[in-house]
Amino acid sequence: MKPFDLNDSLLGKKISHSDKYDASLLFRIPREENRVHYGLNSDDLPFVGFDVWNCYEVSFLTDNGLPVSRVLKMVYPANSQYLVESKSLKLYLNSFNMDKFGKTVVEAEETVRQTISNDLNKLLETQVRISLFNNCSQAIEPFTNFARKDLAKMLPMEKLEAVEFNQFNESPALLKSKPTNEVHEYLFYSDLLRSNCRVTNQPDWGDLFVRISTTHEIDLSSIVEYLVSFRKENHFHEEVVEMIYKRFYDYFNPTELMIAAMYTRRGGIDINPIRASHSALLDENLIDATIRSEKRLRQ
């Protein structure tokens, strides 16, 4: 097989849209290509988890030309060898727009759902769970226990305003804690996460969710400084979450750890990776493909 080259993808390139379903538009990226840079071994991962995608611009036709519009949710495991490149997925989904897939709406919807599932299973060499939702589908909010746990509000504003934020490339040395003989549990989210696309350099905004149990007493202001240090980093969403997980795993030696991010949609797609030390820490409302997730403010 040809060695991986991100330049082979469609990201950042002008592409004409196909009026016919075309699975060849899909492009995959090896996870290992970035994991090696921060010490993650794909054969011995320190986490379980999933990548959860919501695609808001899915449409296709019935045999008589009636358009059907749906929201697609797909979920696939973090231990898969590959992830799907987002622009290729968008173009692939657009190729359904003018094609016909069934006599009835129900038949067309199931044909499209099964086709997408089969194509992504083959591309990513893993099980990809797919659901299509309409306007009547109930949305359920994930991470409900984080509702009043905004990291910035857990710290005195005068303390944050006294910090000199001058590091804008990922800097784990900013993380500060002290070992103790007690277990400390932390639960918080932050809307301060910003990184940039590896190819286009366009900004990606995310809400980060953290749950950690550790014998380290963590300086929470150092967490803020660390998150701010991503502002000039160029990584895919999945890579950012795994990098943060690995840093917290190495620096705080946790007994339990969960890191997740819900990113703002771009190009009609949002990506929401979640990684955890134990499967019980995974948010079921997020990772269940049959549940339409309620969105955050910026989504």
Image (tube, helix red, strand yellow):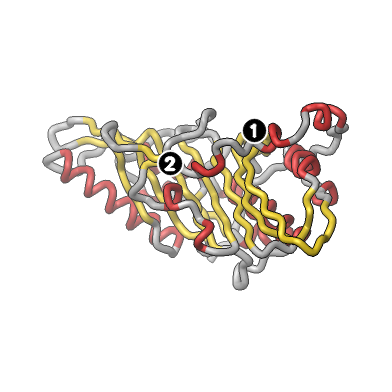
**Amino acid residing under circle 1:** Pro
Q: Residue at x 54, y 63 (%)?
A: 48
Instruction: Tell me the SS state at disc 2.
Output: strand
Instruction: Tell me the SS state at disc 1.
Output: strand
Examine the rendered structure and indicate whether residue 294 appears above or below residue 283. above
The mark found on residue 277 in the picture is none
Residue wearing tag 1: 203
Q: Residue at x 62, y 72 (%)?
A: 44
- The image quadrant of residue 92 is top left
Near mark 1 (Cα within 10 A), the count class, few <14, some 14-19 or many ≥20, is some
**Amino acid residing under circle 2:** Asn
Q: Position of residue 263 (x, y in %)?
A: 55, 38
Near mark 2 (Cα within 10 A), the count class, few <14, some 14-19 or many ≥20, is many
Q: Position of residue 80 (x, y in %)?
A: 51, 63
The mark found on residue 54 in the picture is 2
Task: Using the rendered image of the protein, determine whether residue 93 is visible from the camera's viewpoint.
Answer: yes
Examine the rendered structure and indicate whether residue 84 appears above or below residue 40. above
Q: Residue at x 66, y 46 (%)?
A: 235
- The image quadrant of residue 154 is top right
- Tell which residue pokes out farthest to the front in this image: 182
Examine the rendered structure and indicate whether residue 179 appears above or below residue 144. below
Q: Position of residue 216 (x, y in %)?
A: 78, 58
C-alpha separation, residue under disc 1 versus residue under disc 2: 19 Å
